[in-house]
Amino acid sequence: MFITFEGLDGAGKSTQIGRLKARLEAAGRTMVSTREPGGTPVGDSLRHILLNSEAEAVAPKTEALLYAASRAQLVAQVIEPALTAGKDVICDRYVDASLAYQGQGLELGEQGVAAINQFATGGLRADITFLFDVTVATSRERVENSRIGQPLDRIEQRDNAYFHRVRDEFLRLAKLEPDRIVVLDASNHPDDLEEEIWHHVEKRLPVNKII
Ligand code: TYD
């Protein structure tokens, strides 16, 4: 199973990724958990260019291509080999993030961003995606509180209008693909979110593989 987590920064994805991983392992599944941008040596170098606030201006199309390049490397080096070996993969962000942050956030449009990602991933799609929905105000507040004494990264420095476009696009994608994208209210208690996520994952597990 290929599971992705999406949402604005500060929505609490990392906590839930850890909890889901533990539950899948307890159910006897072999897991690989990774993140974007990054997850490979090449991807980590691209992550540095993309997020380093000192980096010189990166043009919007360059940004979309670099995220797609990091993704292509991750698919080839980590995700596909793991799925082929029968492992489950959890990825912190995937193609939906580019459609939201670059396609709509940067106003590059859906078509071009979808096309470069189709090329980058060879069309590999997540089986299930958890969208952590949080208001822009809450996301901003959580990010700023977590970065005390540290500069915001290149993406985090963008204005509220940018993040409204990102959130709206995530929600639009969820409406288009309700069978794949599960929208979670990220303001719920972490224990409740864990149960909700597990409910959706468990029912997709092959019955004979649950211990
Ligand atoms: P993330 O790893 O979630 O941030 P952090 O390490 O600060 O928790 O994501 C890094 C940033 O990259 C985040 O602001 C979202 C952005 N991003 C895109 O703009 N497009 C993409 O395709 C991806 C994967 C991430």
Image (tube, rainbow, N blue to C red):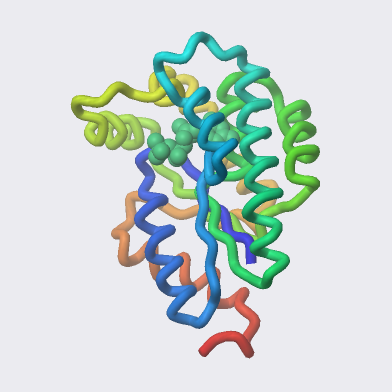
Q: Nearer the viewer, residue 149 or 111?
A: 149
Q: Nearer the viewer, residue 113 or 28?
A: 28
Give me the residue at 45% from left, 45% from top. Answer: 133
Give me the residue at 65% from left, 55% from top. Answer: 79
Q: Quadrant of residue 71?
A: top right
Side of 112 relative to 149 (left or right): right
Quarter of the image with the N terminus is: bottom right
Give me the residue at 60% from left, 22% from top. Answer: 63
Give the residue at the far front of this rendering: 41
Position in image of residue 132 (x %, y %): 45, 49
Q: Quadrant of residue 18?
A: bottom left
Side of 53 relative to 117 (left or right): left
Position in image of residue 149 (x %, y %): 19, 25
Q: Is residue 201 above or below residue 45?
A: below
Position in image of residue 187 (x %, y %): 33, 50
Residue 37 seen from this side: no
Position in image of residue 105 (x %, y %): 56, 24
Give the residue at the far top of this rendering: 57
Give me the residue at 39% from left, 19% from top. Answer: 157
Residue 87 seen from this side: yes
Q: Quadrant of residue 165?
A: top right
Query: Number of marks in the image?
Result: 0
